[in-house]
Image (tube, rainbow, N blue to C red):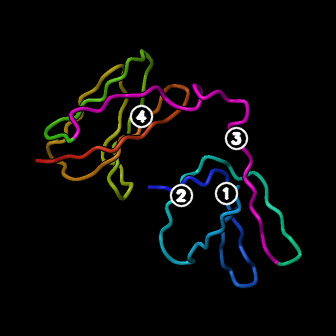
Amino acid sequence: GFNDLSAVEIIKDTTDSSWTARSVNNEVFALETEGVHRIQVSKAIKAAAVDPNAKMSYLPNDIFAGVTAEEKTVDDFTLYPNPANEIVNIFTNNDELFNYVLVNVLGEEITKGTFNKTIAIKTKNLSGVYFIEVTNESGRKKIKKLVVNH
């Protein structure tokens, strides 16, 4: 899972190349220089400034300012059965065209395509945990976890 830190300021100390991050409530945490770090981005980095203490500060701006909650997400879709065995179905009540991408836990693309309302995806040769990303015509996305058991 992810920690919900809202907007985060990411700071690189240019004297020792260390990274720290600070949330809007001033919670500070260190980012190790080696390793994989999972972060969820809800703000876009739009500005950078350098202070006299040799630290670069990356300040995010709210890219969702003025956008309603309805516009932020793709309409919900149903993924069934989950866990899946031979096939999994994607269903939505919306009549528009959707794109989907099925990826494994490493982010490798397994299959992709388009559908309107519903599609059946063969999972007979798959096993494990996957993610299905569905994108509507406006480019809004939603991701759900899929488990395939045999």
Q: How many C-alpha atoms fall within 10 Å of the one at disc 3: few (<14), some, or many (≥20)? A: few
Q: What stretch is highlighted in magenta?
A: 54-82
Label whose residue precedes the other's in the sequence (1 or 3): 1
The amino acid type, in three-letter code, at marker 3 is Ile
What is the CA distance from the residue labelled 2 to the residue labelled 4?
20 Å
Q: Nearer the viewer, residue 22 or 73?
A: 22
Q: Residue lying furthest right in this view?
A: 52
Q: Look at the numbered disc 4 and give the secondary structure of its residue.
A: strand
Looking at the rendered image, the disc whose residue lies closer to the viewer, 2 or 4, is 2
What is the CA distance from the residue labelled 1 to the residue labelled 3?
13 Å
Residue 120 to residue 116: above or below: below
Q: Is the residue under label 1 in contact with that under label 2 (CB below 8 Å)?
A: yes
Mark 1 lies on residue: 8
Label whose residue precedes the other's in the sequence (4 or 3): 3
The amino acid type, in three-letter code, at marker 4 is Val
What is the CA distance from the residue labelled 4 to the residue labelled 1?
27 Å
The amino acid type, in three-letter code, at marker 1 is Val
Q: Look at the numbered disc 2 and give the secondary structure of its residue.
A: loop
Mark 2 lies on residue: 39
What is the CA distance from the residue labelled 2 to the residue labelled 1?
10 Å
Q: Is residue 42 magenta?
A: no
Looking at the rendered image, the disc whose residue lies closer to the viewer, 1 or 3, is 1
- Image spot of residue 120 (x, y percent): 23, 29
The amino acid type, in three-letter code, at marker 2 is Ile
Q: In which quarter of the image is residue 59?
A: bottom right
Mark 3 lies on residue: 63
- Image spot of residue 27 (x, y percent): 66, 64
